[in-house]
Image (cartoon, rainbow, N blue to C red):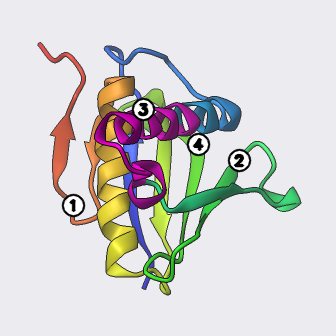
Amino acid sequence: MAQSAYMYLTDGSTVPSITVDELKERLLHYKDQLKKTGTQLGWDYSDSAFPYSIETKPEGENKWFYLKGTDPSYKHMILGIGSKEVNEVDRSFVQIVLPSGATHGDKAKGNELCRYLAKLLKAELHLFNGRVMYFNPRK
């Protein structure tokens, strides 16, 4: 059964909405940071820490893309964007979906990516298990 995590962009978020290309740029920045960490440690850490390649399909253009595992322990996850009306306010969100064939490694990496992106965007994060983490400034 598929599981989803959501990052809602709120009033205190760094951006009011995000595009698929901006989301890909943030993932590439994350991968670059991991590569620099690997350089400091003296080994190729980025392949272990981000064992995915970014893949797109024509039907998901400007809506979603997926991360395809480059290691047998990781299969795939889907990242998409959207908007939803909550309390008469339109809120943009980023959704990470673990399809039914996803592994435990995918879920662990999904949680890691969720926390990284939510902290970067100062978003309200709803994890796969239903728990909520607030990285946005609240009053």
The N terminus, quarter of image: bottom left
Label 4 vs label 3, nearer the camera = 3
Q: What amino acid is labelled 1 in the image?
A: Gly
Residue 129 in view of the camera: yes
Q: What element carries label 3?
A: helix
Q: At 30% across and 56% down in the image, what residue appears? A: 111
* Residue ID for mark 3: 36
Numbered circle sitting on residue 130: 1
| Mark 2 crowdedness (10 Å alpha carbons): few <14, some 14-19, many ≥20 | few
66 up-or-down from 137: above or below: below
CA gap, disc 3 and disc 2: 30 Å
CA gap, disc 2 and disc 1: 23 Å
The C terminus, quarter of image: top left
Highlighted magenta segment, given as a residue range: 27-49
Q: Which residue lies furthest to the right in this view?
A: 58
User: Residue 137 in the image: x percent, y percent?
Assistant: 20, 16
69 up-or-down from 118: above or below: below
Residue 84 in view of the camera: no
Q: Which of marks 3 and 1 is nearer the N terminus?
A: 3
Q: What amino acid is labelled 2 in the image?
A: Lys
Is 121 colored magenta in this rendering? no
